[in-house]
Amino acid sequence: MRWLHRRGRRLVALATAAVTLPLTATLSEASAAPPTPAAPAPYALVPQPVSQKAVPGEGFSLTPQTRISVLSRDSEAVGVGTYLSKLLAPATGYDLPVVKDTHAPKNAVVLDPNGPKKLGAEGYTISSGKNGVVVKAHGAQGLFRGVQTLRQLLPAEVESRTGQSRAWTVSPVQISDSPRYEYRGVMLDVARRFYPVAQVKRYIDEAAAYKINTLHLHLTDDQGWRIAIDAIPDLTKVGASTQSGHTGGTDWFYSKADYQEIVSYATSRFMTVVPEIDGPGHTMSALASVPELNCDDKAKPLYSGFDVGISTYCLADGTHQGNTRRFLKAVIKEVAKLTPGPYIHLGGDEAPHTPPDQYASYVKSATEATTGRHKTVMGWNELADADIPAGSIMQYWGEDDDRKSIGTAEESASIVSTRNGVAQDAKFVMSPSDHAYMDMKYDASTPYGLSWSGYVPVERSYNWDPATITGKMDGTGSIVPADKIAGVEAALWADRAYEGSSSLPTPATRWPEPHAYADYMSFPRLPALAEVGWTPQAARDWKDFRQRLAQHAPRWTAAGIAYHPAPGVPWPGTVRTVEGVHTIETEGVALDSAGSTSDGTDLVLWAPNRGNNQTWTIAPQSDGTYTVTSKTSNKCAEATGGAGTTVVQRTCNGQPTQRWKINPIGDDHTIASAGSGLLLTAGSATNGAKATVQSDTGSALQRWYIG
């Protein structure tokens, strides 16, 4: 793919006009009791544990007399106990004491860090019953992950920051759990939209609740330089005064004390901070602050716009290569000193104006400065187009269009750079933009974000496998070997963190607080991506996940997280009736009129976008059947023939061929032609597949979610 279509930097035309909805709006909903899941897991845990078993009998009820017993004097383990006590206190009103014990007492919450080594650094077990709860791990980090599961075994109101009057009973269960991948991250773009320290800490807590263990901070870009460097004070004095759509800031950066506060807070949540110093592109804030980084030795103007690919360090001659080398050495020296974690992220993406030899010069200077500080090099996959140290971590952000090029004469730049990384013994963190970029709109109605990598509904965030995401579309031929996959990272860019982002902002544009943008775009997708990184692939199932995910909505509400009740999930408190305006989806694709208004147009399947072409009015008829009418064309879905007949749209005429019997099956439905009795069937779960009618085979492609 081309750089202009990457990483949220340019808005491409939407297939349908975007409609701004209130942040809590959903289609066809009414107040009602939560729907009953068809076949729920024993408990609605996210990420799904490796093993969980409901235990007969009563659970353990917390009381003011309950104590948290830590079977260790290790300060980190005791710290997990203190964290749990403080977590429970606001809602319960209990000040549960944390005590150091040598043996597990009854009627207590026991945290035991002396579990077997086979649990690994983050594995844990939980045993809960009438007489108490025991969380066991091989060290404090595993205890902390187990505590995140423990909180999900308590009522949702436990997340409230104010007192709640109710019983606090831990569900009776036996759990054994450990992560699929060691690296499970989230990236926060604080360069384009500055997040104050308190809001970064808030996001750390939200991510840690779903066992995210890495916070990648995108600290520098064209629109702002966000970390103070004592050796080059103008980087923040000048370069931090802008952000996307805003100018004139005086405190839009992290002082050394601020950054250390963030790092310390993340560490207390067993989260590693990865600082990113992007280059040689995305550097306008540096070029405006340090004149000698430019070929004419004059500072560039500050930039608060939205364009992409507009900047690069001057690397055209030995003098300026030396200037850049000294600059990187000074910056990375201070950042490395402030960062206890093992990684420095060097960016390396979207540098279209940097010739290959000059790009190689940048990478050499940046990687030498990083390894010289005993840090592991990270970078976007393009970094591997130059020489990188063995063992570097490349972050893959390709998309399906890149995968389609694998094995062809014209493999995409992302695939080529990924091959280069594998050849240089790099490991990879998977962040495919069309699955893991949380700044992508959920659908056409999303008020924030972009859609250059397509719409990313919750199901698309969930339904992918890191082991095959660098392979062909059929899942074969992965370029990155399984043992070279370090993990997964969700990315929340802030290119268009304002309402009405389908066009550039105006003076009247609404800019929400950064945390409000983060909550809306991250929830429910961040928990979905957390499960991708934690849970074994064989244990993941979208239909089961959406049931579990829905039950987390009351937790988010209690915690003050203004989540987006995205389509495709049976959220509590709403009931979706067949009648009304809906999308009709199966296996990650939606019934689509192809944007046509013509009679006889074949109906197809396409990635969900909630546009008019995927919006249908389902109207009841006197005989108990329904008509299904396209919002784009105002024409009815019609099936006139036998098995294999393509479903088309045609001017509504009230005939049986345009009537459909809709029957619930759990949370889904079958949709049968009233004329033939044959079921509406998706030809496949790929874009452009035809909708047909077929005999009932029990196929998932004949089960439709009406959302």
Image (cartoon, rainbow, N blue to C red):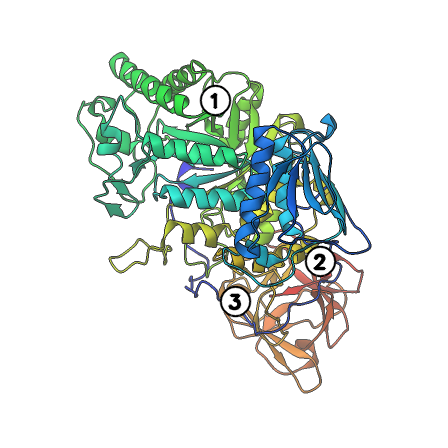
Q: Amino acid at mark 2?
A: Leu
Q: Which residue is mark 3?
A: 26
Marks 1 and 2, the one that precedes in the sequence: 1
Q: Quadrant of residue 638?
A: bottom right
Q: Is residue 350 visible?
A: no
Q: Nearer the viewer, residue 387 or 138?
A: 138
At numbered mark 1, what does the secondary structure look like: helix, strand or loop? strand
Q: Nearer the viewer, residue 441 or 688?
A: 441
Query: From the viewer's perspective, is residue 396 above or below residue 495?
Result: above
| In-image side of 416 versus 682 (left or right) | left
Q: Nearer the viewer, mark 2 or mark 3?
A: 3
CA gap between label 1 and label 2 equals 44 Å
Residue at image position (57%, 77%) is: 651
Q: Which residue is mark 1?
A: 377
Instruction: Look at the numbered discs 2 and 3 and tell me whether their residues touch, using CB distance below 8 Å.
Output: no
| In-image side of 488 versus 256 (left or right) | right
Marks 1 and 3, the one that precedes in the sequence: 3
Marks 2 and 3, the one that precedes in the sequence: 3
Instruction: Look at the numbered discs 1 and 2 and tell me whether their residues touch, using CB distance below 8 Å.
Output: no
